[in-house]
Amino acid sequence: MNKINIRPYQAQDRALLRTLCCDVADRGGPIENFFPDREVAADLLTRYYTDFEPDSTFVALCDNQLVGYINGCMDNRRHGLAMSWLLMPPLLIKAFKHGIFFRPEINQLLRGILKNWRRVFVYRKKSFHSYQGHLHIGIAADFRGQQVGRNLLNILVEHAAGSGITELTASVHEANKAASVFFEAQGFVVRDRYPMVLIRDGKEEHYHSLLYVKTIS
């Protein structure tokens, strides 16, 4: 088994973390499966954690290669405000400059987002307005099954407990069976199931987003 070193995130990890996030963003596969621009996707998926709350992110390294990360947020409400008012406006401008809105595959993505409006504005409103925490985790394909995720999660749970957080949540695509097995093995339980629509190759995929919750004593 490879020797893995886990430590707090540092500024020099930023580029590697963004790359790994995009490599595993689609149920363990690359972001390009449904979104064409890595830089914009990396901003959307990681910038809050690396730029606004870096002390809640931890990374796993093997021979100086970043092979895993866990992005944490200790205040969902703060995250929502930062995303809405500080991150999304410049991100939309960047997306426009990159010509994203003129790409045909984006029309499918936008159609899916419109069909999912209830998930944000109705189903998950309570979660977004809470002062509890959430997390995102990503592990390089060659390092899965080596307890990297478990060790990263344990460190984040300790950090959350020290911050006074009593609940951590994680969203999982129901087709990602490996992620469900992982979170359930770590003491997470499904609290809610939100209907979702994803459009790929012009066809609608209907599934649920599972909201996993871990209570921290």
Image (cartoon, rainbow, N blue to C red):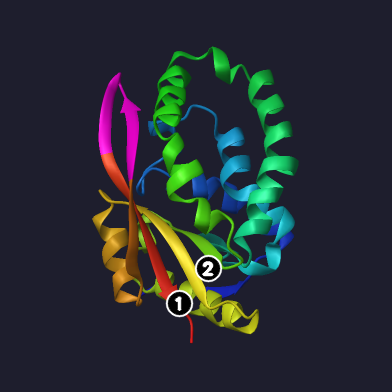
| Label 1 crowd (10 A; few <14 / some 14-19 / many >=20) | some
Magenta: main secondary structure equals: strand
From the viewer's perspective, tell me whether residue 187 is left or right of residue 101: left
Type of amino acid under label 2: Ala
Mark closer to the observer (2, 1): 1
Instruction: Label 1, secondary structure: give it.
Output: helix
Name the image quarter holding residue 163. bottom right
Asked whether 66 or 69 is in front, the reply is 69
Name the image quarter holding residue 204. top left
User: Residue 129 in magenta?
Assistant: no
Q: Where is residue 95? Give x, y as percent.
A: 64, 25
Residue drawn where x is 56% and y is 46% of the image = 45
Q: Where is residue 127? Give x, y as percent.
A: 51, 58
Residue located beneath label 1 in the image = 151
Type of amino acid under label 1: Asn
Looking at the image, residue 159 lies above or below residue 53: below
Asked whether 199 or 140 is in front, the reply is 199
Q: Where is residue 49? Give x, y as percent.
A: 64, 56
Mark 2 and mark 1 in contact? Answer it, CB < 8 Å.
yes
Residue drawn where x is 58% and y is 82% of the image = 161
Residue located beneath label 2 in the image = 60
- Looking at the image, the residue that sits furthest to the bottom is 217
Find the magenta span and give its range: 195-206
User: From where the camera sits, is residue 145 visible?
Assistant: no
Looking at the image, residue 129 lies above or below residue 47: below
| Label 2 crowd (10 A; few <14 / some 14-19 / many >=20) | many
The label on residue 191 is: none
